[in-house]
């Protein structure tokens, strides 16, 4: 019997026989990954006892998912998202010390080269939607302000679309901006109230959601990447707790600590200072960064 | 809080939150399948704690696998094969009563419309390779012969290629045939000794095998589908136990009961009767069919 195997495959020894073949792997981590994936796959098959037809349906689903992918569309990331895998990987890689702001998924709509703007700028470039002002502080876990923190923010518009989804309709870099804090750690900018939106649901993942009786919507949110020297970079959102989908985010991105009250304000004096035409929305939210673990 | 969820996602409750969303699924089996797959996926992620980069590598591997598929190539079936999943599904769906011949995977090279041939015909149409004669009986589990059993056989040639892989090089239907037993359940036909061959290894699955230190070869075999009224159809192989890869079939298809001794014969009288030029190979193997479960 060859040294590279433990005998012939049977239903009982299936995991040992298959993972036994990985003994010669040069990359220890790859071996570990394939050992665990093989074991969990075999456990799933043994629990489900799929028919040959069900197995073929799974093969064809994965094939369609791969073939839906192109330069603009990553259907396997969507699949990972709707199965909670993306959030789980995010959680595992971003365990924060007590008091630090929590992370959530990056999402597909970040753009690397958004413009740096002066504090207070309006990131809404097309005057569409309901005016909103967002402000708060960037703090360390002792509550001290962080100067020179870089806040990269992006959001969907009042119809639930990002600029990159509506090239030629929205101005380039609409509802995106980069801000830098001063010594008091304070930030503020103007924008419009975002709206919930569906993840792309015209592919195999959208069909799966439909068959499972699930909707494809993400509750209204703003995305942030906040970085500062000596601190861990924070990738997160803030969410509108009054959104109809706040308890059923299609990608499971909502955390209690990321809810930020969106308050409706009737104050003609403040509206005039912000150059808003009338009533507006106001969101106050502080972010707390964890110190880098050297 | 919506009735369709159990609270916000955390590392601890990830399975319950994600599977809780499937509560509205109309298809109970789909719900069960997705519940188990979600649970096993989350277990794997929690055990492995992948980095974001490793997660992205997995996404891109699955994407490449889907994009390798076309009319002629099914890379996700290959992946299922090399992870032992195909054999496991086969085993679960073909648990046989004691004494019945065991099944193994169908493989991708079966052709539906092979010609029916008279018993004893030579399925080798191009005189390439070492002559071989195969014979035996089709029996029930009491050892009684089965008349009118249909034997669909196909095999690779002496270089490890099926006819469909070498259109224009091998004659159509080379090394394929359908035979029907008479009252004594006996079958025999002439062929050539098959050779081991690699599964297609120029794609992502072949690369994975390489990284795992695994070879892509299947030991030499003949494929069979054997059917008869009142019996379960048997999809199986017989293997050459002296093949260099017999203990390390890339797709785990070998079972002890499927080994069939390939004997070298020097017998000019028999060779002449078979119209063979000299020494030949002989394989004797009976197949036992299980009665249909109503
Ligand atoms: Cu051995
Ligand atoms: Fe978003
Ligand atoms: Fe084969």
Image (cartoon, coloured by chain):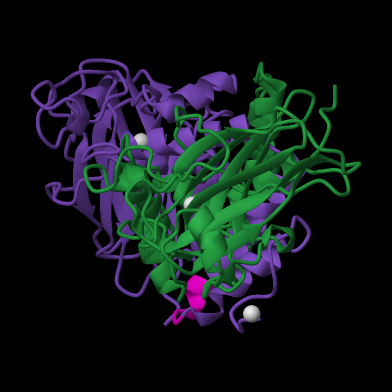
Chain colours: A purple, B green
Q: Residue at x 45, y 32 (%)?
A: B114
Residue B25 lies, with reference to residue A104, above or below; the image says above
Query: Which SS does the magenta portion mostly show?
Result: helix
Quadrant assignment for the N terminus of chain A: bottom right
From this viewpoint, which residue is outermost toward the right?
B142
Q: Quadrant of the C terminus of chain A?
A: bottom left
> Is B180 left or right of A203, judged from the image as shown?
right
- In this view, the residue in front, B155 or B34, is B155
Tell me, yes or no, if residue A63 can be seen here.
Answer: yes
Q: Residue at x 20, y 50 (%)?
A: A178
Question: Which sits in the foreground, A234 or A188?
Answer: A234
Bounds of the magenta segment: A26-31
Q: Is residue A192 above or below residue A108?
A: above
**Residue B41, can we see it?**
no
Q: Whole-percent x and y of residue B229?
A: 75, 23
Question: Is B221 on the left or on the right of B124, as rendered?
Answer: right
- Count of labels in the image: 0
Residue for point 83% across, 32% down: B291
The quadrant holding residue A48 is top right
Q: Indicate the position of residue A192 as horizontal and vertical percent values.
A: 27, 26
Q: Residue furthest front?
A: B269
Q: Residue at x 34, y 26 (%)?
A: A194
Rendered image quadrant of residue A268: top left
List x then y, in percent, for residue B128: 34, 58
Residue B18 vs residue B77, the one in the foreground: B77
- Whether B106 is drawn above or below B157: the answer is above
In the image, residue B203 sits, relative to residue A241, either above or below, namely below
Residue A246's x, y, as percent?
53, 28
B60 in the magenta segment: no
């Amino acid at each position: 019997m060859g040294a590279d195997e433990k005998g012939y495959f049977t239903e009982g020894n299936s995991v040992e026989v298959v993972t036994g073949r990985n003994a010669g792997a040069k990359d220890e981590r790859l071996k570990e990954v394939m050992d665990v994936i093989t074991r969990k796959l075999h456990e799933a098959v043994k629990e489900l006892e799929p028919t040959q037809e069900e197995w073929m349906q799974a093969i064809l689903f994965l094939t369609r998912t791969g073939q839906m992918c192109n330069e603009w569309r990553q259907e396997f990331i969507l699949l990972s998202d709707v199965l909670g895998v993306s959030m789980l990987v995010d959680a595992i890689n971003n365990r924060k010390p007590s008091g630090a702001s929590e992370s959530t998924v990056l999402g597909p709509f970040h753009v690397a080269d958004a413009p740096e703007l002066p504090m207070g700028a309006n990131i809404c470039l097309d005057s569409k939607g309901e005016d909103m002002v967002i402000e708060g502080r960037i703090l360390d876990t002792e509550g001290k302000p962080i100067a020179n923190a870089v806040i990269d923010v992006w959001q969907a518009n009042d119809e639930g679309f990002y600029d990159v989804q509506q090239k030629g309709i929205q101005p380039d870099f609409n509802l995106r901006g980069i801000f830098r804090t001063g010594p008091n750690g304070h930030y503020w900018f103007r924008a419009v109230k975002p709206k919930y939106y569906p993840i792309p649901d015209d592919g195999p993942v959208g069909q799966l959601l439909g068959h499972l009786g699930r909707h494809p919507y993400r509750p209204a949110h703003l995305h942030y990447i906040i970085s500062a020297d000596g601190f861990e970079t924070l990738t997160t959102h803030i969410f509108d707790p009054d959104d109809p989908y706040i308890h059923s985010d299609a990608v499971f991105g909502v955390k209690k600590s990321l809810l930020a009250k969106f308050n409706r304000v009737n104050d003609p004096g403040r509206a005039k200072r912000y150059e808003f035409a009338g009533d507006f929305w106001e969101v106050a939210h502080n972010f707390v960064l964890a110190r880098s673990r050297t």
